[in-house]
Image (cartoon, rainbow, N blue to C red):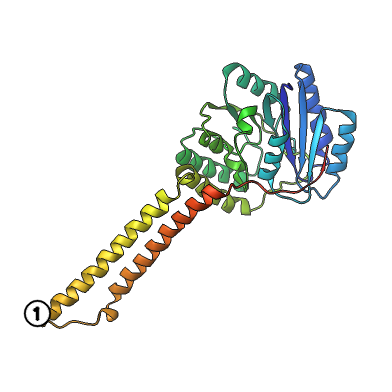
């Protein structure tokens, strides 16, 4: 079996690919590691695929997947993980900001210390402080608090896994930011961290815009909810819905009782329909019923449909 699979998702990185390939090959050959390099072209509009094809003609250890359009990094990683055959799998970004010299060290950590996963930590970064460093620190702090994992850099591009780990998780949506949480959720708890070298971008521009800030926090909420209630949504929606329904029902009953009490004692009163609290109680009951039904439908969907990443492959090496 192949010792090492290197999975590299990319989008419009034609300038970086030849240099990245030569660097990886030199490092792995020097360390006498049998390997495969898997490029996933996530809908590039430049000459990235042609460059990969040319490199594959030189090295039979290169495999590649080409998407019909840009489906996102999570889908690219999912496709790469499905293809990977190495005992240990390492992921790298294609922009040369991740240093391939780290690969043998990560490989040995997994092999000798029996980690399920090692996540890189870009302790010293060469990105924009305002647009990348500060948001990343906020995301990582929030992810630590919600997941219980004491990692400094959840979204670092360079990570290493046992093969069985990447075959056990499904990376979809934008969940690549929180792969360590996905790994923990399926029962792999020996997750380590290693400080890795980070380098300034040499070619092209960053593919991440302002939307990544909002999406990052929304994804964090999603991963927290899935971690807590993904296997039984009724425990969340059903409980909350029941509490709201009971509160609304008791409030409506109290309003009705006060109305009858005042009528019985010939005290001045108003129509129940004119009491604003009646409508608040009624709304609370309706919302509670809807939440309960949401939990019920969630249970049905969970048991009848399995969510899988969606992407279209138009070429493969």
Estimate the x, y position of residue 239 in percent, counting from the top left. Answer: 36, 52
Write down the residue under mark 1. Answer: 265
Residue sitting farthest toward the front: 304
Q: Residue at x 72, y 37 (%)?
A: 80
Q: Is residue 312 visible?
A: yes
Of the pair 31 and 137, the residue shown nearer to us: 31
Q: Residue at x 9, y 79 (%)?
A: 265
**Left or right: 12 with respect to 133?**
right
Q: Residue at x 45, y 55 (%)?
A: 296
Relative vertical location of residue 15 with respect to residue 69 in this rendering, above or below? above
**Left or right: 124 with respect to 263?**
right
Instruction: Check disc 1 and report its element: helix, strand or loop.
Output: loop
Q: Residue at x 85, y 28 (%)?
A: 60
Of the pair 167 and 183, the residue shown nearer to us: 167
Q: Image quadrant for the N terminus?
A: top right
Of the pair 125 and 38, the residue shown nearer to us: 38
Relative vertical location of residue 287 with respect to residue 191 in this rendering, above or below? below
Relative vertical location of residue 190 with respect to residue 220 in this rendering, above or below? above
Q: Image quadrant for the C terminus?
A: top right
């Amino acid at each position: 079996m192949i010792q090492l699979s290197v999975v590299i998702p990319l989008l419009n990185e034609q300038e970086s690919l030849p240099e990245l390939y030569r660097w990886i090959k030199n490092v792995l050959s020097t360390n006498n590691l049998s390997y495969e390099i898997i490029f996933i072209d996530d809908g590039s509009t430049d000459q990235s695929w042609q460059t990969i094809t040319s490199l594959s003609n030189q090295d039979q250890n290169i495999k590649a997947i080409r998407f019909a359009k840009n489906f996102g990094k999570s889908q690219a990683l999912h496709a790469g993980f499905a293809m990977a055959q190495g005992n240990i799998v390492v992921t790298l970004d294609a922009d040369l900001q991740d240093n391939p010299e780290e690969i043998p060290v990560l490989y040995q950590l997994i092999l000798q210390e029996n980690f399920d996963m090692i996540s890189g930590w870009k302790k010293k970064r060469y990105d924009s402080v305002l647009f990348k460093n500060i948001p990343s620190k906020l995301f990582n702090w929030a992810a630590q608090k919600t997941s219980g994992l004491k990692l400094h850099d959840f979204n670092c591009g360079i990570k290493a896994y046992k093969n069985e780990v990447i075959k056990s998780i499904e990376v979809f949506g934008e969940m690549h930011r929180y792969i360590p949480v996905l790994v923990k959720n399926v029962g792999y708890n020996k997750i380590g961290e290693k400080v890795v070298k980070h380098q300034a971008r040499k070619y092209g521009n960053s593919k991440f815009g302002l939307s990544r800030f909002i999406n990052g926090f929304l994804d964090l909420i999603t991963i927290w909810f899935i971690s807590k209630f993904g296997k039984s949504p009724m425990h969340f929606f059903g409980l909350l819905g029941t509490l709201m329904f009971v509160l609304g029902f008791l409030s409506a009953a109290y309003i009705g009782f006060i109305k009858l009490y005042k009528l019985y004692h010939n005290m001045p009163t108003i129509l129940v329909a004119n009491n604003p609290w009646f409508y608040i109680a009624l709304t609370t009951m309706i919302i509670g019923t809807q939440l309960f039904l949401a939990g019920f439908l969630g249970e049905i969907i969970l048991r009848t449909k399995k969510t899988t990443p969606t992407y279209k492959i138009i070429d493969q090496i």
